[in-house]
Image (cartoon, grey):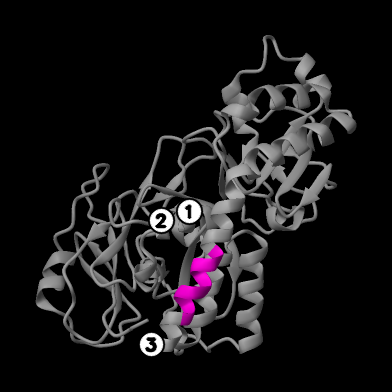
Amino acid sequence: MASTTTTTTTLLTLSLLLLLLSLSSATSTTLLDAVEILSSSGFKCMAVHLELASQTIQPHHSFTIFSPTDAAFHRLPHHLPLSLLRYHLLPHAFSLHSLTSLPFGASIPTLLPNHSLTITTPTPTTTISINNITLTPSPIFHHPNLTIFPTTNFFNPHFHLPPLHPSPKLNLPTTCTPPPPNRLSQVARLLRSHHFSLMASLLDLQFPAACNRRALTLFAPLDEAVASHARNNLTQLSTLLRHHLVPCKMFWPDLASLRDGTLIGTYEKGFALNVTKCKTHTLLLNGVRVVFPDMFRGDCLVVHGVQHVLSVRNGKRKHHAKHDTYRVSVAEDDGEDEVSPHSSEFDDDNHHESKNMDKDGGNGQAFRMILHVTDFEI
């Protein structure tokens, strides 16, 4: 056990050092490359504006750029605001396949704070619609660190779909057949290909013991977020993983249907994820945006990419459960609706707590999902 921990720390320390060195110059180089590519591809207006703004854009390991045509720029009544430019930049390099795999209504955070693009493709297809604008299926440029898509017009930063009406009962699977080793390797490769390599390393070393016929959801932070968080906290990597693991499968529609204020328990005892929704209907977990919903959907594991580490600072601490069991419960006015309990026993304090959660401001109905976990160690 000690040797495994030492190996994990050594591998991740090396990964962190390499990542921190590369991040210092990655942003300016990537954006300047994008300027040259856009200019040579006939998108000269976007190239000029991107070059002027490149020094004001915060560092990221990779980018997706949606470039309107020169004709779209000429239709603007005034000059291009920096805020609108940032709305067309994503802090992650999405391939066409990645975008087409996102479900309808998924929100993709942009570099414009508190503003996301919305997937409006009604059914899975080779084309992609964002904010009701159909993208050309062929990107101008695609590389692991940079993807550029042409668009015929600018995205409207005020666009949003009507809010979803959540169901008061969620049937979330909590057991599964463990995936074969080659399937786990596929998940790890997928994470690494999208700049979630540090979480992939943790998953490689610790997931086989974690699954144990349990369905799981992993919220994977981007490499630069893990690097920044773990720079002085290498001994807390196992805790970091537990903060990001939920003991049931939660697909994007499940998450999107949760009400503001819902609490989702994790494998870290007493630590819960707090669901909030801002005015633009963007879903946040402990104040962190989901940048790649449903990155992986398997029989035993669902993976969502998140922009930052889900930290204790923004999370919710809850009392420790006493029994070796976990249960998913929804507390409502008319009683507690239990979903897939593993035991009829439950700690009295937690039972009292789940029946006395905060009231929903809209209709006076309490709605908090709580997942209690105590029998799992990483």
Q: Which residue is mark 3?
A: 2
Point out which mark residue 229 bears. 2
Instruction: Compare residues 237 and 105 and report the one nearer the observer.
Output: 237
* Residue 156 can be seen, yes or no: no
Instruction: Compare residues 16 and 48 and report the one nearer the observer.
Output: 16
Give yes or no for residue 196 being in the magenta stretch. Answer: no
Point out the frontmost of discs 3 and 2. Answer: 3
Side of 10 where 25 appears, left or right: right
Q: Which residue is mark 1?
A: 225
Q: Of helix, strand and loop, which mostly describes the magenta segment?
A: helix
Picture coordinates of residue 69 (x, y %)?
A: 81, 27
User: Quadrant of residue 28 in the image?
Assistant: top right
Q: Secondary structure at mark 2?
A: helix
Which part of the image, by quadrant, shows the C terminus? bottom left
Picture coordinates of residue 9 (x, y %)?
A: 45, 74
Q: Residue at x 79, y 14 (%)?
A: 74
Q: Residue at x 27, y 59 (%)?
A: 368
Q: Is residue 175 above or below residue 306?
A: below
Pointer 2 local density, CA inside 10 Å: few below 14, some 14–19, many at least 20: some
Per the model, the C-alpha gap separating discs 1 and 3 is 26 Å
Amino acid type assigned to the residue bearing label 1 in the image = Ala
Side of 372 where 226 appears, left or right: right
Picture coordinates of residue 287 (x, y %)?
A: 37, 47
Quick check: marks 1 and 2 in contact, CB under 8 Å? yes
Per the model, the C-alpha gap separating discs 1 and 2 is 6 Å
Quick check: marks 1 and 3 in contact, CB under 8 Å? no
Which residues fall within the magenta stretch? 7-15
